[in-house]
Amino acid sequence: QKRCIVVGAGIGGLAASIRMAARNYEVSVLEKNKLPGGKMHQIERNGFRFDTGPSLFTLPHLVTELLNLGPEPSEPTFRYEKLKNVCRYFYDDGTMINVPGNPEDFAREAEIKTGEPAANIINYLNTARERYRSSADLFIFNPLKNLISSARHKKPEELKPLLKVKPLRSMHKENEIAFQSSQIIQLFDRYATYNGSSPFKASSMLNMISHLEHDEGAYFPEKGMYNIVESLYHKALSLGVKFQFETAVTHLVSEKDSITKVIAGNKELEADLVISDVDVNTLYRGPARKLKMPRSVKKPDLSSSALIFYWGMNRTFPQLDVHNILFSTDYRGEFRAIFNNHQLFNDPTVYIFVSSKIVEADAPKGKENWFVMINVPPGTEKTDQEWIKQARENILKKIHRTLKINPREDILFEEIATPKTIETNTGSWKGALYGNNSNSIWSAFLRHQNKSRKYHNLFFTGGSVHPGGGIPLCLASAAIVEKEINQQ
Ligand code: FAD
């Protein structure tokens, strides 16, 4: 039996371990933390439970596909539901757009609230759908090196939606052309943040991201996001995967064109295959420092990071739903602050995620668990107490201005995540949430690939490599790794 070592038990590492174990490899996962999950983690305190990282969940079948691999499908402990409402968007002028989970109802709501003709929304989402369908297997579910050969196998009409894209146009520019209402433009611009990028820089090609939530649907696991990790972890165990926690890999040892050993402190493990789930920007500065560092890693153009307050709230807030966005009045200024000036912005867009609205057990009766997040520049230098205090004030003022409430007195306790703690807890370089950003049209092509060019038995999964960050893409990266190994 061939031995496969997976470094890191983030979502990509878990998915890769399941895939390789289902192919009968002897799989060991080495994880520096005490528990699996990486960025997808949880905090339990005083009767509250918080998912600490991802909260928006699309394409759930990518998780169930993994749970059904191997000789016996898992017990159906992983259950999820489609959200009735995708998100509530709040603007400083008092407008609130409640986005229902189907395009027609959303278009109607948008027309009532902003005057944007419903037909514009429907046309836009139709274009996003066509774009996604014609590009998903080219750009997401296959290695990028197969792009040309895969495109050759497509019928011309299948490629038509892609040929219509103007890749040099930014997401924002395309949205400005598509819509009349500045509030709807801002709503669709926000999808750039789903991979930590700026809508004023990222290619209009990425406007297809909105299709996933509005058309395919936004979902939520019945027991919260961390249940995705728990379910995958138990599936991996059931397939015989061995986990070694509190085991930080310190060296990948190479010989000619292969990785022969993985060293973790005083442990030395021999491997036929190595799959790394570690952020590549951290990997090449740590365990793989003796390997040649690719250019995109040498000078990384990082995605945004986050500052998050986990607040146990003493009461419930009927004006909020599960996912809520309080928009900045100056979106351009906010992205300039994040990506050009590397500063906090005094009127930030605030994301409030309240899982207890749907998972009752996540907060004591009559209370709520608030996950309050703003996007901030990656980097761990400035995140001192003064910086956190200033951001907290900006957030509280924003909530007061937009929702006309003052939650200050209702906060029973708080925990905080900064770029620095995200880096320490998950190994993500400078706390960037999604590896490198997608602010240039070349980003997809410059992203680290899933198979090493030099070492025939070294592979890469997770949010910092092709096809990119976010749960669905991390799961896709593990599927590509499996394909690459299978083709050897
Ligand atoms: P990671 O989660 O990056 O895990 C890597 C693992 O490797 C960690 O467990 C780490 O401890 C381990 N490791 C590192 N170095 C070593 C070493 N030397 N030896 C052993 N182990 C090591 N995505 C969405 O889809 N929707 C969202 O709403 C969303 N929101 C987010 C909000 C936040 C605050 C954050 C942080 C992320 C968010 N994301 C979201 C992104 C998503 O969480 C990530 O893309 C995904 O979880 C990354 O998984 P990964 O496989 O890259 O592994």
Image: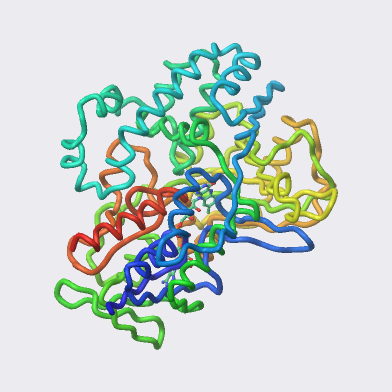
Image-based side of 387 in relation to 431, left or right: right
Residue 444: image quadrant is top left
Q: Quadrant of the C terminus?
A: bottom left
Across and down, in percent, residue 134 comes to 31, 32
Q: Nearer the viewer, residue 30 or 437?
A: 30
Across and down, in percent, residue 198 comes to 44, 36
Image height check: is 165 above or below 247? above
Across and down, in percent, residue 264 comes to 39, 81
Image-based side of 62 in relation to 322, left or right: left
Q: Nearer the viewer, residue 284 or 221?
A: 221
Answer yes or no: is residue 460 visible.
yes
Answer yes or no: is residue 387 visible.
no
Q: Residue at x 32, y 47 (%)?
A: 141
Q: Residue at x 23, y 69 (%)?
A: 457
Residue 46: image quadrant is bottom right
Image height check: is 462 above or below 5? above
Q: Residue at x 66, y 62 (%)?
A: 43
Q: Quadrant of the N terminus?
A: bottom left
Image height check: is 472 above or below 206? below
Query: Farthest residue toward the front?
Result: 72
Q: Residue at x 32, y 79 (%)?
A: 262
